[in-house]
Image (tube, grey):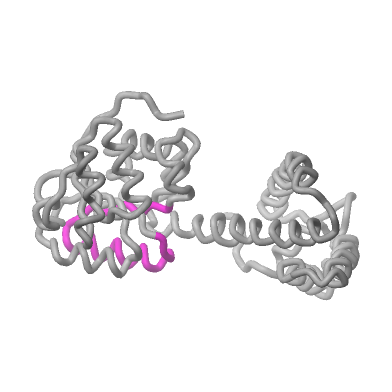
Amino acid sequence: MKNPSPIPLPRVVILGAGLMGSAIARELLRLGCSVDVWNRTPAKTTPLVQEGAGTGTLQSVMTGPALVLLCLSNYETARAVLAEAEEPLRDAALVNLVTGSPTEAEEFSSWASERGARYLDGAIEAYPNDIGQSTTLVNYSGHVDVWTDHRELLLAIAGASTYVGERPGAANVLDAAMAGSFYNVSIGAFLEAQSYALSQGVTPQQLRSGLPYWLELLRRSLEEGISAVEGGVYDTDQATLVVYHDAVRSWLSTVNHADQRSTLLTANEESLRSAVAAGHGPRSIFAQHLLTSKSVFS
């Protein structure tokens, strides 16, 4: 559902008219914002201008008070573009929606601050079609005043957005963890599982009908895993690491015998085997954390 709430409508400058930048521009235009768009290839801004956006040279769109959203390809490109309009950066509110590393965000924040800008880093955990939805998430970190001053507008772009702290790289930490290590790897694991199942005569409908059960089981298991790591308690009266390892070895043999791809299941078996070898066999599956991380909850 689109966010229908009235919000303050500052002028917004969007640098980058790709798929995501265009989706954000269209949503802000729908809300009644004054939106100026700029792209290195001017023709890409034409559809947005036809829908009501303004455009111009980089220097002209950056002149005057505005919330500046960076929707460019990477941090290096964003820095190069802003360097061309360096003087208008003073006192500017910058929101960087570029995908990158925590270190890149930290360095970009320092670079922007040296030029007088207030900087907020954002990690978009969604697709262009999700922009404007109440369930869409963007994690933000950096200058708290930018979040506070423009919170309602940023929530109109993505209604489930959160501010995760003043450290500029914090949003990218969550992005690498949840979008990278968890979400993308989970899709890869499912595709391997689906390929094996389909090769053995399982129908797409059978896979589809089983999804609610497995997704709910996964949700409960993840919550248990967070609690186990948070408390440092890995005892179990359900299934030990040894039990999991024996099962995974059997499943891996089955998939390999069918000559199907098993890259992620193989990695899972290796992780379980290492945990058992390290003496964690009687513990829960979450004791694998002791091998993969030196950090603890504070």
- For the question of whether residue 190 can be seen, the reply is yes
Q: Which residues are magenta?
A: 99-123
Residue 243, picture quadrant: bottom right
- Residue 273's x, y, as percent? 82, 72
The image shows residue 133, relative to residue 273, as above or below, that is above
> In the image, 22: left or right of 279?
left
Does the magenta-highlighted stretch encompass residue 114? yes
- Residue 295's x, y, as percent? 60, 64
Residue placed at 24% from the left, 38% from the top?
51
Tag count: 0
Does the magenta-highlighted stretch encompass residue 40? no
Between 69 and 41, the one nearer to me in the picture? 41
> In the image, 8: left or right of 122?
left
- Residue 177's x, y, as percent? 55, 59
> In the image, 222: left or right of 6?
right
Between 152 and 277, the one nearer to me in the picture? 152
The image shows residue 88, relative to residue 275, as above or below, that is above
- Residue 226's x, y, as percent? 67, 50
Between 251 and 276, the one nearer to me in the picture? 251
Quadrant where the C terminus lies? bottom right
Residue placed at 49% from the left, 59% from the top?
173
- For the question of whether residue 93 can be seen, the reply is no
The image shows residue 174, relative to residue 1, as above or below, that is below
Residue placed at 22% from the left, 49% from the top?
46
> In the image, 77: left or right of 198?
left
Residue placed at 44% from the left, 43% from the top?
129
